[in-house]
Amino acid sequence: MARTGRPREFDKDQTLARALELFWSRGYGATSIQDLVDALGVERGSLYGTFGDKRRFYLDAVRLYWDVYERHLMTALDTTPLLPALREILTHPARLDELISDVGVPQGCLVGNTTAELVPHDSEATEVVARSYRRFTDVVTDALRRAQATGEVTDNARPEAQAQLLLYIVQGLSLVSRAGLDRTSALAAIDTAVDGLRRRDP
């Protein structure tokens, strides 16, 4: 006899946060709906009814990831001096060997991973990624503009261009780190980039 009654209730936000961890550790393509059902303990019909198909579920997880990251970024950069905080942001991918060591844990930046896996053939994923990158440069530009005004950061370049360069660095490190990264060389490269932002007295 078929089961009847109301579907099992679950906390949508908590379920999405747990799905985010699974997608982050495995990637979009390697995570099946059955994987999500098993890991989350939620019936397939309930997942479809709440989040839609796997693609929409994944993109909701990416949006959640970025929202959390952006709040962290804004808090981290709301400080003086700025350059030590910027260095900390940039070194996160280079310190993956310290921060995570178990198989199956999150790897790299989920937005960067989405870029590699779904962009450009998925237009909605492309927009989610592009918006995230725009927000990164907006937040970092504002912080650099303040640091230029206090004389900490060089004004030899526009803060928008400086922020764009830092985006390329952090995303490049995140992607390279997934294939193995020489930590010493990576940190030396980051220190060179941060030092290049420092204002030099004439």
Image (tube, rainbow, N blue to C red):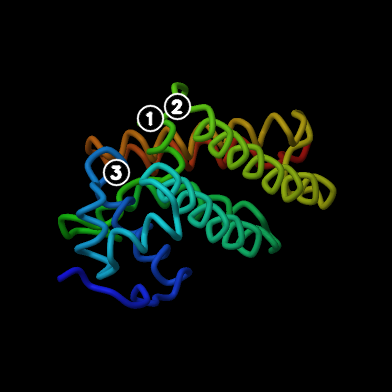
Q: Amino acid at mark 1?
A: Ala
Q: Quadrant of the C terminus?
A: top right
Q: Amino acid at mark 2?
A: Val
The residue closer to the viewer here, 193 or 36, is 36
Badge 2 density bin: few <14, some 14–19, many ≥20, Cα 10 Å: some
Q: CA distance from mark 3 to mark 1?
A: 10 Å
**Mark seen at residue 116:** 1
Horizontal arrangement in the rendering, residue 46 relative to residue 2 (left or right) = right
Mark 1 lies on a secondary structure that is helix
Mark 2 lies on a secondary structure that is loop
The residue that appears at 39% across and 44% down in the rendered structure is 187
Horizontal arrangement in the rendering, residue 167 relative to residue 2 (left or right) = right
Mark 3 lies on a secondary structure that is loop
Q: Quadrant of the N terminus?
A: bottom left
Badge 1 density bin: few <14, some 14–19, many ≥20, Cα 10 Å: few
Q: CA distance from mark 1 to mark 2?
A: 6 Å
Residue 27 rendering spot, x and y as whole percentages: 29, 43
Circle nearer the N terminus (3, 1) = 3
The residue that appears at 36% across and 39% down in the rendered structure is 186
Residue of label 2: 119
The residue that appears at 67% across and 46% down in the rendered structure is 140
Residue 94 rendering spot, x and y as whole percentages: 35, 46
Residue 68 rendering spot, x and y as whole percentages: 54, 61
Q: Amino acid at mark 3?
A: Gly
Front disc: 1 or 2: 2
Identify the image quadrant of residue 165: top right
Residue of label 3: 27
The residue closer to the viewer here, 113 or 144, is 113
Badge 3 density bin: few <14, some 14–19, many ≥20, Cα 10 Å: some
Q: Are marks 1 and 2 in contact (CB under 8 Å)?
A: yes
Identify the image quadrant of residue 74: bottom right
